Image: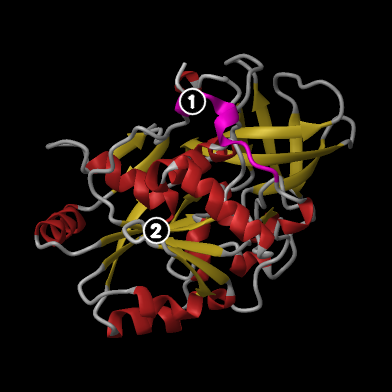
Amino acid sequence: MEQQHLRSTYFYELPKERIALYPAGKREGSRMLVYNRATKNTAHSYFYDIVKYIRPGDVIVVNNTKVLRARMFGKKEETGGKAEILLVKEESRNRWEILVKTGGRLADGMTIEFAPGITGKIDLKRGKSFPLVMEFSGTADIREMLPKLGLMPLPPYIKRQPDPEDAGRYQTVYAKVPGSVAAPTAGFHFSEEIIGKLTAAGAELTEVTLHIGTGTFKPVKEEDIRKHPMHEEEYEVTAQTFEKLKNAKKAGRRIIAVGTTSARVLETVFSKEGAPLTGSTSLFIYPGFSFNFIDALITNFHLPESTLFMLICAFCGTEKTKEIYKEAISGNYRFYSYGDVMFLE
Protein backbone atom coordinates (compact mmCIF):
# COMPACT_ATOMS: atom_id res chain seq x y z
CA MET A 1 0.00 0.00 0.00
CA GLU A 2 1.31 3.45 -0.89
CA GLN A 3 2.33 5.74 1.97
CA GLN A 4 -0.27 8.34 0.97
CA HIS A 5 -3.06 5.82 1.58
CA LEU A 6 -1.98 4.99 5.15
CA ARG A 7 -3.89 6.71 7.93
CA SER A 8 -0.79 6.82 10.13
CA THR A 9 0.90 9.02 7.51
CA TYR A 10 -1.37 11.85 8.66
CA PHE A 11 -0.60 11.71 12.36
CA TYR A 12 1.15 14.51 14.22
CA GLU A 13 1.62 15.28 17.91
CA LEU A 14 -0.29 18.25 19.30
CA PRO A 15 0.13 19.42 22.90
CA LYS A 16 -3.28 19.82 24.56
CA GLU A 17 -2.52 23.42 25.48
CA ARG A 18 -2.46 24.32 21.78
CA ILE A 19 -6.21 23.58 21.46
CA ALA A 20 -8.10 26.88 21.57
CA LEU A 21 -11.00 26.78 24.02
CA TYR A 22 -12.10 30.37 23.33
CA PRO A 23 -12.00 32.63 20.27
CA ALA A 24 -9.51 35.46 19.83
CA GLY A 25 -10.50 38.81 21.33
CA LYS A 26 -11.39 40.13 17.87
CA ARG A 27 -12.27 38.03 14.84
CA GLU A 28 -9.50 39.49 12.70
CA GLY A 29 -7.04 39.32 15.59
CA SER A 30 -6.14 35.66 15.02
CA ARG A 31 -2.59 34.89 13.97
CA MET A 32 -2.14 33.86 10.33
CA LEU A 33 0.48 31.58 8.83
CA VAL A 34 0.99 32.27 5.12
CA TYR A 35 2.46 29.65 2.79
CA ASN A 36 3.19 30.28 -0.88
CA ARG A 37 3.23 27.00 -2.82
CA ALA A 38 5.16 28.51 -5.74
CA THR A 39 8.02 30.04 -3.76
CA LYS A 40 7.83 27.53 -0.84
CA ASN A 41 8.11 30.52 1.50
CA THR A 42 6.33 30.75 4.85
CA ALA A 43 5.45 34.00 6.61
CA HIS A 44 3.77 34.87 9.90
CA SER A 45 1.19 37.60 10.26
CA TYR A 46 -2.29 38.36 11.61
CA PHE A 47 -5.59 37.99 9.80
CA TYR A 48 -6.15 41.75 9.82
CA ASP A 49 -3.29 41.83 7.28
CA ILE A 50 -5.01 39.43 4.87
CA VAL A 51 -5.58 42.35 2.46
CA LYS A 52 -1.81 42.48 1.83
CA TYR A 53 -1.99 39.02 0.28
CA ILE A 54 -5.06 39.64 -1.86
CA ARG A 55 -4.84 40.66 -5.52
CA PRO A 56 -7.38 42.82 -7.37
CA GLY A 57 -9.82 40.47 -9.10
CA ASP A 58 -9.51 37.65 -6.53
CA VAL A 59 -12.79 35.83 -5.85
CA ILE A 60 -13.15 34.81 -2.21
CA VAL A 61 -15.74 32.05 -1.79
CA VAL A 62 -17.39 31.69 1.63
CA ASN A 63 -19.85 29.17 3.03
CA ASN A 64 -22.95 31.02 4.21
CA THR A 65 -24.44 28.16 6.23
CA LYS A 66 -25.78 29.07 9.65
CA VAL A 67 -25.23 26.92 12.73
CA LEU A 68 -28.36 25.80 14.53
CA ARG A 69 -28.48 25.98 18.32
CA ALA A 70 -28.85 22.23 18.04
CA ARG A 71 -27.83 21.03 21.51
CA MET A 72 -30.83 20.55 23.80
CA PHE A 73 -31.27 19.36 27.38
CA GLY A 74 -34.38 17.78 28.84
CA LYS A 75 -35.69 15.14 31.20
CA LYS A 76 -37.38 11.80 30.62
CA GLU A 77 -41.10 12.02 31.29
CA GLU A 78 -41.25 8.60 32.94
CA THR A 79 -38.26 8.84 35.30
CA GLY A 80 -37.21 12.47 35.40
CA GLY A 81 -33.71 11.40 34.38
CA LYS A 82 -31.55 13.87 32.47
CA ALA A 83 -31.18 13.62 28.70
CA GLU A 84 -29.15 15.55 26.14
CA ILE A 85 -29.79 15.50 22.40
CA LEU A 86 -28.11 16.93 19.35
CA LEU A 87 -30.22 17.68 16.29
CA VAL A 88 -28.40 16.24 13.28
CA LYS A 89 -30.66 16.49 10.26
CA GLU A 90 -34.26 17.50 9.61
CA GLU A 91 -36.25 14.78 7.84
CA SER A 92 -39.48 16.76 7.84
CA ARG A 93 -41.05 19.40 10.03
CA ASN A 94 -40.63 18.36 13.68
CA ARG A 95 -39.01 15.05 12.70
CA TRP A 96 -35.22 15.01 13.14
CA GLU A 97 -32.33 12.62 13.14
CA ILE A 98 -30.64 13.04 16.51
CA LEU A 99 -27.82 11.88 18.69
CA VAL A 100 -28.81 11.28 22.30
CA LYS A 101 -26.93 10.98 25.57
CA THR A 102 -28.77 9.66 28.60
CA GLY A 103 -28.38 7.20 31.43
CA GLY A 104 -30.13 3.86 31.03
CA ARG A 105 -31.41 2.17 27.93
CA LEU A 106 -33.37 3.76 25.13
CA ALA A 107 -36.88 2.57 24.39
CA ASP A 108 -39.15 3.10 21.43
CA GLY A 109 -41.60 5.86 22.30
CA MET A 110 -39.47 7.25 25.14
CA THR A 111 -40.53 10.87 25.64
CA ILE A 112 -38.22 13.69 26.68
CA GLU A 113 -39.55 17.03 27.91
CA PHE A 114 -37.51 20.12 26.96
CA ALA A 115 -39.89 22.79 28.27
CA PRO A 116 -43.45 22.77 29.62
CA GLY A 117 -45.56 21.27 26.84
CA ILE A 118 -42.65 20.78 24.43
CA THR A 119 -41.57 17.17 24.09
CA GLY A 120 -39.76 14.81 21.78
CA LYS A 121 -40.54 11.12 21.26
CA ILE A 122 -37.81 8.68 20.24
CA ASP A 123 -38.60 6.49 17.25
CA LEU A 124 -36.58 3.26 17.16
CA LYS A 125 -38.47 1.69 14.26
CA ARG A 126 -35.42 2.18 12.05
CA GLY A 127 -33.31 0.24 14.53
CA LYS A 128 -31.06 1.33 17.38
CA SER A 129 -28.19 2.46 15.20
CA PHE A 130 -27.33 6.16 15.38
CA PRO A 131 -28.54 8.64 14.45
CA LEU A 132 -31.96 7.94 15.95
CA VAL A 133 -35.15 9.79 15.03
CA MET A 134 -37.17 12.10 17.27
CA GLU A 135 -40.68 13.43 16.70
CA PHE A 136 -41.33 16.78 18.40
CA SER A 137 -44.70 18.04 19.62
CA GLY A 138 -46.00 21.08 21.47
CA THR A 139 -44.70 23.52 18.87
CA ALA A 140 -45.45 24.12 15.21
CA ASP A 141 -41.74 23.87 14.38
CA ILE A 142 -38.97 23.01 16.85
CA ARG A 143 -36.60 25.21 14.80
CA GLU A 144 -38.49 28.26 16.09
CA MET A 145 -37.80 27.22 19.69
CA LEU A 146 -34.06 26.68 19.30
CA PRO A 147 -33.09 30.29 20.15
CA LYS A 148 -34.70 29.72 23.58
CA LEU A 149 -34.12 26.02 24.19
CA GLY A 150 -30.93 25.23 22.29
CA LEU A 151 -27.25 25.83 22.87
CA MET A 152 -24.45 26.13 20.35
CA PRO A 153 -23.06 22.63 19.58
CA LEU A 154 -19.39 23.24 20.35
CA PRO A 155 -17.02 20.56 19.00
CA PRO A 156 -16.13 17.67 21.34
CA TYR A 157 -12.52 18.86 21.74
CA ILE A 158 -13.66 22.14 23.31
CA LYS A 159 -13.92 20.81 26.84
CA ARG A 160 -16.31 23.33 28.36
CA GLN A 161 -19.97 24.27 28.35
CA PRO A 162 -21.19 26.88 25.81
CA ASP A 163 -21.43 30.42 27.17
CA PRO A 164 -23.37 33.47 25.88
CA GLU A 165 -20.43 34.64 23.76
CA ASP A 166 -20.53 31.41 21.73
CA ALA A 167 -23.95 32.34 20.33
CA GLY A 168 -22.24 35.01 18.24
CA ARG A 169 -18.67 33.79 17.90
CA TYR A 170 -19.43 30.20 16.89
CA GLN A 171 -21.03 31.70 13.79
CA THR A 172 -19.69 33.63 10.82
CA VAL A 173 -20.76 37.25 10.28
CA TYR A 174 -22.20 36.26 6.88
CA ALA A 175 -24.18 33.20 8.09
CA LYS A 176 -27.58 33.19 6.36
CA VAL A 177 -28.93 29.70 5.63
CA PRO A 178 -29.75 27.64 8.77
CA GLY A 179 -28.80 23.98 8.62
CA SER A 180 -25.41 23.17 10.17
CA VAL A 181 -24.54 21.54 13.48
CA ALA A 182 -20.89 22.56 13.14
CA ALA A 183 -19.46 25.83 11.88
CA PRO A 184 -17.35 26.60 8.79
CA THR A 185 -14.65 27.81 11.15
CA ALA A 186 -12.27 29.37 8.63
CA GLY A 187 -14.90 32.08 8.27
CA PHE A 188 -14.70 33.07 11.93
CA HIS A 189 -11.80 35.43 11.17
CA PHE A 190 -13.82 37.65 8.84
CA SER A 191 -15.37 40.78 10.34
CA GLU A 192 -17.54 43.32 8.53
CA GLU A 193 -14.57 45.68 8.57
CA ILE A 194 -12.23 43.15 6.96
CA ILE A 195 -14.82 42.31 4.30
CA GLY A 196 -15.08 46.00 3.50
CA LYS A 197 -11.31 46.30 3.15
CA LEU A 198 -11.15 43.25 0.88
CA THR A 199 -13.80 44.55 -1.48
CA ALA A 200 -12.17 48.00 -1.48
CA ALA A 201 -8.93 46.27 -2.53
CA GLY A 202 -10.65 44.81 -5.59
CA ALA A 203 -11.58 41.36 -4.29
CA GLU A 204 -15.08 39.92 -4.64
CA LEU A 205 -16.86 37.83 -2.01
CA THR A 206 -19.13 35.11 -3.34
CA GLU A 207 -21.29 32.71 -1.33
CA VAL A 208 -22.03 29.00 -1.57
CA THR A 209 -23.84 26.82 0.94
CA LEU A 210 -22.77 23.54 2.51
CA HIS A 211 -24.53 22.33 5.65
CA ILE A 212 -22.01 20.72 7.97
CA GLY A 213 -23.09 17.63 9.88
CA THR A 214 -21.60 15.59 12.69
CA GLY A 215 -19.75 13.52 10.10
CA THR A 216 -17.12 16.25 9.95
CA PHE A 217 -15.88 14.95 13.33
CA LYS A 218 -16.01 11.28 12.28
CA PRO A 219 -12.54 9.78 12.76
CA VAL A 220 -10.84 7.81 10.02
CA LYS A 221 -10.63 4.31 11.48
CA GLU A 222 -9.45 2.33 8.46
CA GLU A 223 -5.67 2.16 8.04
CA ASP A 224 -6.27 2.29 4.28
CA ILE A 225 -7.93 5.70 4.07
CA ARG A 226 -9.53 4.81 0.72
CA LYS A 227 -11.88 2.51 2.68
CA HIS A 228 -13.13 5.36 4.86
CA PRO A 229 -16.89 5.92 4.34
CA MET A 230 -16.91 9.68 3.76
CA HIS A 231 -19.96 11.44 5.14
CA GLU A 232 -22.43 13.24 2.87
CA GLU A 233 -23.28 16.92 3.25
CA GLU A 234 -25.91 18.94 1.41
CA TYR A 235 -24.79 21.89 -0.69
CA GLU A 236 -26.17 24.54 -3.02
CA VAL A 237 -24.59 26.86 -5.56
CA THR A 238 -26.98 29.25 -7.31
CA ALA A 239 -26.92 29.38 -11.11
CA GLN A 240 -25.88 33.03 -10.91
CA THR A 241 -22.95 32.22 -8.63
CA PHE A 242 -21.94 29.28 -10.82
CA GLU A 243 -21.75 31.49 -13.93
CA LYS A 244 -19.90 34.19 -12.03
CA LEU A 245 -17.30 31.71 -10.77
CA LYS A 246 -16.93 30.00 -14.14
CA ASN A 247 -16.34 33.31 -15.87
CA ALA A 248 -13.90 34.46 -13.19
CA LYS A 249 -11.87 31.29 -13.63
CA LYS A 250 -11.82 31.69 -17.41
CA ALA A 251 -10.59 35.25 -16.93
CA GLY A 252 -7.64 34.00 -14.88
CA ARG A 253 -8.85 35.42 -11.59
CA ARG A 254 -7.79 33.53 -8.46
CA ILE A 255 -10.46 31.49 -6.69
CA ILE A 256 -9.83 31.53 -2.93
CA ALA A 257 -11.90 29.05 -0.91
CA VAL A 258 -12.63 29.99 2.68
CA GLY A 259 -12.52 26.68 4.50
CA THR A 260 -12.49 23.05 3.48
CA THR A 261 -16.29 23.12 3.11
CA SER A 262 -16.17 25.78 0.38
CA ALA A 263 -13.31 23.90 -1.26
CA ARG A 264 -15.29 20.65 -1.36
CA VAL A 265 -18.34 22.39 -2.83
CA LEU A 266 -16.29 24.03 -5.58
CA GLU A 267 -14.34 20.90 -6.44
CA THR A 268 -17.61 18.94 -6.52
CA VAL A 269 -19.54 21.34 -8.73
CA PHE A 270 -16.66 22.09 -11.11
CA SER A 271 -15.34 18.52 -11.30
CA LYS A 272 -17.15 17.80 -14.53
CA GLU A 273 -19.47 19.44 -17.02
CA GLY A 274 -23.08 19.31 -15.92
CA ALA A 275 -22.45 18.56 -12.25
CA PRO A 276 -25.58 19.37 -10.19
CA LEU A 277 -25.63 22.78 -8.49
CA THR A 278 -27.73 21.42 -5.62
CA GLY A 279 -27.32 18.05 -3.98
CA SER A 280 -25.08 16.22 -1.56
CA THR A 281 -21.37 15.61 -1.74
CA SER A 282 -19.25 12.88 -0.23
CA LEU A 283 -16.10 14.06 -1.96
CA PHE A 284 -13.05 12.83 -0.04
CA ILE A 285 -9.95 14.83 -0.92
CA TYR A 286 -6.60 13.29 0.00
CA PRO A 287 -3.12 13.29 -1.61
CA GLY A 288 -3.30 12.22 -5.20
CA PHE A 289 -6.37 14.38 -5.80
CA SER A 290 -6.04 16.96 -8.57
CA PHE A 291 -7.64 20.28 -7.69
CA ASN A 292 -9.59 21.53 -10.69
CA PHE A 293 -10.84 24.86 -9.49
CA ILE A 294 -9.50 26.50 -6.34
CA ASP A 295 -6.21 28.41 -6.39
CA ALA A 296 -5.83 29.30 -2.72
CA LEU A 297 -7.30 28.31 0.61
CA ILE A 298 -8.01 30.04 3.91
CA THR A 299 -8.32 27.42 6.63
CA ASN A 300 -7.82 26.68 10.31
CA PHE A 301 -5.49 24.01 11.72
CA HIS A 302 -7.12 20.57 11.74
CA LEU A 303 -7.02 17.38 13.81
CA PRO A 304 -4.39 14.74 13.05
CA GLU A 305 -5.57 11.85 10.86
CA SER A 306 -8.76 13.77 10.00
CA THR A 307 -10.21 14.05 6.51
CA LEU A 308 -9.73 17.83 6.79
CA PHE A 309 -6.01 17.48 7.50
CA MET A 310 -5.76 15.09 4.54
CA LEU A 311 -7.33 17.74 2.31
CA ILE A 312 -4.63 20.23 3.33
CA CYS A 313 -1.99 17.58 2.61
CA ALA A 314 -3.48 17.15 -0.87
CA PHE A 315 -3.27 20.90 -1.45
CA CYS A 316 0.24 21.59 -0.12
CA GLY A 317 1.89 18.17 -0.09
CA THR A 318 1.99 15.91 2.95
CA GLU A 319 5.56 16.55 4.08
CA LYS A 320 5.25 20.31 3.58
CA THR A 321 1.96 20.34 5.51
CA LYS A 322 3.60 18.51 8.39
CA GLU A 323 6.45 21.03 8.34
CA ILE A 324 3.95 23.90 8.44
CA TYR A 325 2.09 22.36 11.36
CA LYS A 326 5.32 21.68 13.23
CA GLU A 327 6.32 25.31 12.74
CA ALA A 328 2.90 26.45 13.96
CA ILE A 329 3.12 24.28 17.07
CA SER A 330 6.59 25.52 17.95
CA GLY A 331 5.38 29.07 17.29
CA ASN A 332 2.50 28.69 19.77
CA TYR A 333 -0.30 28.98 17.24
CA ARG A 334 -3.77 28.09 18.50
CA PHE A 335 -5.44 25.05 16.87
CA TYR A 336 -8.86 23.84 15.76
CA SER A 337 -12.22 25.64 15.57
CA TYR A 338 -11.48 28.69 17.72
CA GLY A 339 -7.81 28.70 16.75
CA ASP A 340 -5.61 30.59 14.33
CA VAL A 341 -5.67 30.49 10.56
CA MET A 342 -3.57 29.74 7.47
CA PHE A 343 -3.57 31.36 4.06
CA LEU A 344 -2.30 28.80 1.56
CA GLU A 345 -1.72 30.25 -1.90
Task: Answer left or right for 316 relative to 108.
Answer: left
- Res. 61 image quadrant: bottom left
Q: Position of residue 214 (x, y in %)?
A: 57, 38
Residue situated in front as seen by the camera: 100 or 296: 296
Q: Principal SS element in the magenta part?
A: helix
Q: Amino acid at mark 2?
A: Lys
Which residue is pictured at 22% across the width and 38% down the height? Answer: 271
Q: Position of residue 159 (x, y in %)?
A: 78, 51
Task: Answer left or right for 318 relative to 262.
Answer: right
Mark 1 burial class by Cα count in 10 Å: few <14, some 14-19, many 20+: few
- Residue 224 is covered by the magenta coloring: no
Which residue in the structure is indicated by mark 2?
A: 40
- For residue 3, which numbered disc appears in the image? 1
Residue numbers of the magenta segment: 3-13
**Residue 141 visible in the snapshot:** no
Residue contact at pointers 1 and 2, CB within 8 angstroms: no
- For residue 141, which numbered disc appears in the image? none
**Residue 90 visible in the snapshot:** yes
Q: Position of residue 216 (x, y in %)?
A: 54, 40
Which residue is pictured at 70% across the width and 19% down the height? Answer: 108
Q: Amino acid at mark 1?
A: Gln
Q: Earlier in the sequence, mark 1 or mark 2?
A: 1
